[in-house]
Amino acid sequence: MLGGKFITLGVTGGIASYKAADLASKLTKLNARVHVVMTGSAQKFVAPLTFEAVTGNPVHYDTFASSTGFHVPHIDLAYNANILVVAPATANFLGKTAHGIADDLLTTTILAANCPVLICPAMNVHMYANKVVQSNIERLKQLGYYFLEPESGRMACGHQGKGRLPEVHAIVDRIVEIIPPSGDLSGITVLVTAGGTREPIDPVRYISNRSSGKMGYALARAAMLRGARVILVTAPTSVAPPAGVSLVQVETALEMRDAVMEHYAAADVVIKAAAVADYRPRLVAEQKIKKEGDTLVLELDKNPDILMELGRNKRKGVTLVGFAAETENLLENAREKITKKNLDLLVANDVTMPGAGFGTDTNIAKLIHPDGGVVSLELMDKYDLANRILDEVIIVSQGTVL
Ligand code: PMT
């Protein structure tokens, strides 16, 4: 994923510096070589030992130290880096960098950098809104520095507003966007569907299901981090989409069908994790339906089966992966779907099992092949399952697209 990439991570002194330890850990797990540079204030919030433990590398903070494995630390940390990330970046750091001041190892390294520099400011809402800070940010943007804007919310100082360090996955996504990984899915286009479609009844009501979109979004993120171009066709969800994917937002099954068909021609792999409503109300009331009788009968029309349509018109070289959400007879029902829909792989999940199916961060799946072969997987994080599914896609696609 980020295998072999050298990332210099600058940490400055803000309360969000504890989140930088999580960031360093995530980047290391993605196989990046992470070298952390801390300012003196950052060390008052988090001990260098924390970063050493998660990255396996010594932490750098002394411009004149010779014991960190580098001959001239500020030059080597800048020269070797594929990207330099500063998270969190304080107002003080922004002010110094915007004016070329280099009075510690981090600001000196920044001046020596030739690679992309991504700055993630985090500070009190009023400090962030301050005109001096904003003009420093503007100046740095004009000079070609990349920025990831802070998020809004409740801050450690008790104030509410913009200034929080974005979630770690958002920083990772931005890094991947700036330095695309060269993974095993490079050159491949993966079309993923996610979420539960909404079928309107009237302007305020709809029929839907319990899909949160987590499974589909995990697949989109995993494919993107392995180098694929990802088109994510999504029904409404509250999950943050990975930054580097092409997002196509839809609401109903009919809209999802149109979007999938529009992008199908570009796809090498299609993974249908979405929970598509099988039926939609025949009539959508123009006004809110009044509460009049004791019962209300809705007449429903069958929605097209998008996956079945793809299976019927499968192009040579395309790998088609379906999901099956079952509450009984998992294998029997799943095997019927793989044949009927002409799939190359089917991910079957028994959604009644604790930790599996709708809304959870984890899932339990069986990967079923058309020849009847079954790979039974344990309970695992949806992101890890996404990677297992992609591993299996590579196996079933050998000799075709990959
Ligand atoms: O989103 P999460 O909260 O993370 O939950 C994940 C999940 C449970 C939604 C996911 O793991 C899952 O099982 N997705 C498929 C849900 C589903 O609709 O299953 P199904 O057995 O009804 O459909 C079989 C396949 O046909 C699916 O790939 C589905 O996308 C597709 N289908 C179904 C109906 C239809 N009209 N068109 C379709 O393309």
Image: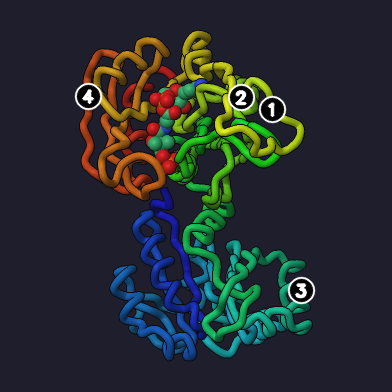
The numbered mark at residue 284 is: 1
Give above or below for 319 relative to 56: above
State the CA–CA distance, disc 4 to disc 1: 42 Å
Give above or below for 329 relative to 106: above
* Mark 4 residue type: Val
CB atoms at circles 3 and 1 under 8 Å apart?
Answer: no
Q: Secondary structure at mark 1?
A: loop
Name the N-terminal-most of marks 4 and 1: 1
State the CA–CA distance, disc 3 to disc 1: 52 Å
The numbered mark at residue 281 is: 2
| Residue under label 3 | 139
Q: Within 8 Å of ligand 1, the CB of disc 2? A: no
In the rendered view, does 328 fall on the left or right side of 265? left
Occupied quadrant, residue 28: bottom left
Residue 227 position, x and y percent, is: 48, 41
Q: Nearer the viewer, mark 3 or mark 2?
A: 2
| Residue under label 4 | 374
Name the N-terminal-most of marks 3 and 4: 3
CB atoms at circles 2 and 1 under 8 Å apart?
Answer: yes
CB atoms at circles 4 and 1 under 8 Å apart?
Answer: no
In the rendered view, does 1 fall on the left or right side of 81? left
Name the N-terminal-most of marks 3 and 2: 3
CB atoms at circles 4 and 2 under 8 Å apart?
Answer: no
